[in-house]
Amino acid sequence: MAATSPDQQLLAISSHESILIYNIRTKELQQKLDGCGYFAFRPTVDNKTESIQNDVALAEVAAKPAYLLVSGVAGGLPQGDSCRGGLTIWELDQHGRLIDEEEPIDADTLASQAIDAIVPQLKAEYEWSKDFIDNCGLHTDIVSALSKAAVAHRLRHNTVLEDASLENFGSIHFSNDGRHLLYHDEHSVVVYHVDAGNAVYRLTGHTDRIVWSGYSPNSEKIATISWDGTMRMFSASTDELSWVADMGGQCWSGAFSPDSKYIVWLSEWCRCFEWHPDGQQIAMCAEKTAYVWRPFDRPGGSIVQTYTIEKRNLTTSMAEVNEVSWMDEGRLLYLGASEGTKLVYDTEMNTKEIFTRRSDGNDQGAWVVEGFHGVFRKEDGESFYLSVDGDGKVRYWARFVTPSLPETEKEEKEQLMIKGPGWEEEDEVKKEPYVETGRYVQVTNISKGADREDWAEKGVDLWMA
């Protein structure tokens, strides 16, 4: 996966072996971390330096990390999936480098020196031949052992959370102020105070894997969603359970509305969606189609935009829409296909930018989780996107900028629905009742005092939080 820091200065990319930290503007590698798997940057924490009255206090604030990142722990193996389980917390300075870093060991050279030291005894006392020593894998095994030990040594000053993991599917791992972290431990979610370094609460009750958890934007609520088909709503200030709802089938993801009043959650194959900043529409995807849904327009809501990918526009017929997100304060809508194609739609100007790369015939791993980011702006005013692609490269894409519409034209345009039968075509059609994704989305708007057992409809449900 890939992610940018809250201030859009750093790009982090994870693999099975490490996490690489780059400066987005200079494109320079700043740091290689012994992390892997899913990770998250901590939101910016306001240290309020303007109120500091003495040099000692100012020095203490300056010594605090500029960035904090939580990730899986790498096992130190030179090849393959080396995540060993657990999470660790990385503290980075303003350049994206570790605050406390030690010189790496040369495991290959040390392994050769160790073998050279014992070869005479192995030959004289145990009749080991040089060919056997060279071909038995002894050198490789010693390198692996040293690499694992070196990772453990480098992590000795890090905070390591055992039996902890982060889930994807849009989970919100940190509270809005960055002081609390949510991590998963089997069928429970732990609320961890980052600054104090201790677990505050353990949220329990699910009977299967928890695949999504998140804080509300106002940090007052925590929701958890599990494969057991239920969503549980907790108070963030205590571990008190507010209510439970059952969808009746396997569930995958959820999201609070920007005002924290509503929560929408997903089941079946609809696993990615995002609220628009205005809190009035939701972008979502399922299989080969992406939708923009306005849940408050009428009972059941209405679909105002639909995008469907076609075989002729993609490098593989198996491709699906895997990601949707809003960019540039909601003006742009991003869609990402599993084979690597990326589309950015300007909702004001009805224009599209399509980003593709030539396929070598092997599309396995073409899609990178959260691999497309923007909009970034240069000092000269130009703007760009960047993509982290499955071929191991980071690409910078110049943005095609169109002028904004006057407010009167925006209002007229909002009366139309743009339904795209493919990545390359669009037809204007009348707004229609919400019908296409009925198996994914249903709306229930009931007060907290109602019987919540009857709320769930199979698909995506919108509830009062």
Image (cartoon, grey):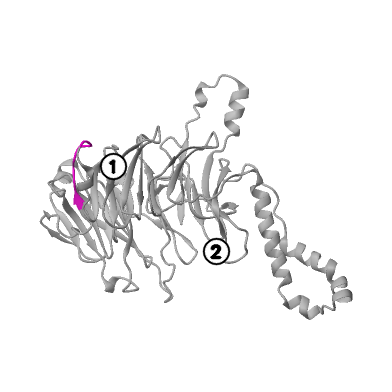
- In the rendered view, tell whether residue 204 sits above or below residue 120: above
- Say if the magenta span includes residue 448: yes
Kindly indicate the quadrant of the structure image that contains residue 64: top right
In the picture of the structure, the residue carrying the numbered disc 2 is 81
Q: Amino acid at mark 2?
A: Asp
Quadrant the C terminus occupies: top left
442, 365: nearer the viewer = 442
Q: Position of residue 234 (x, y in %)?
A: 35, 38
Determine the residue positioned at 28% across, 37% down. 259
Determine the residue positioned at 59% across, 46% down. 97
357, 133: nearer the viewer = 133
Q: Earlier in the sequence, mark 2 or mark 1?
A: 2
* Magenta segment boundaries in residue numbering: 442-449
- In the rendered view, tell whether residue 120 sits above or below residue 427: below
Badge 2 element? loop
Q: Is residue 227 visible?
A: yes
Kindly indicate the quadrant of the structure image that contains residue 336: bottom left
Q: Residues within 10 Å of mark 1 (few under 14, many from 20)?
A: many
In the picture of the structure, the residue carrying the numbered disc 1 is 257
Q: Position of residue 51 (x, y in %)?
A: 51, 21
Determine the residue positioned at 20% across, 47% down. 454
Q: Amino acid at mark 1?
A: Ser
Dominant SS in magenta: loop
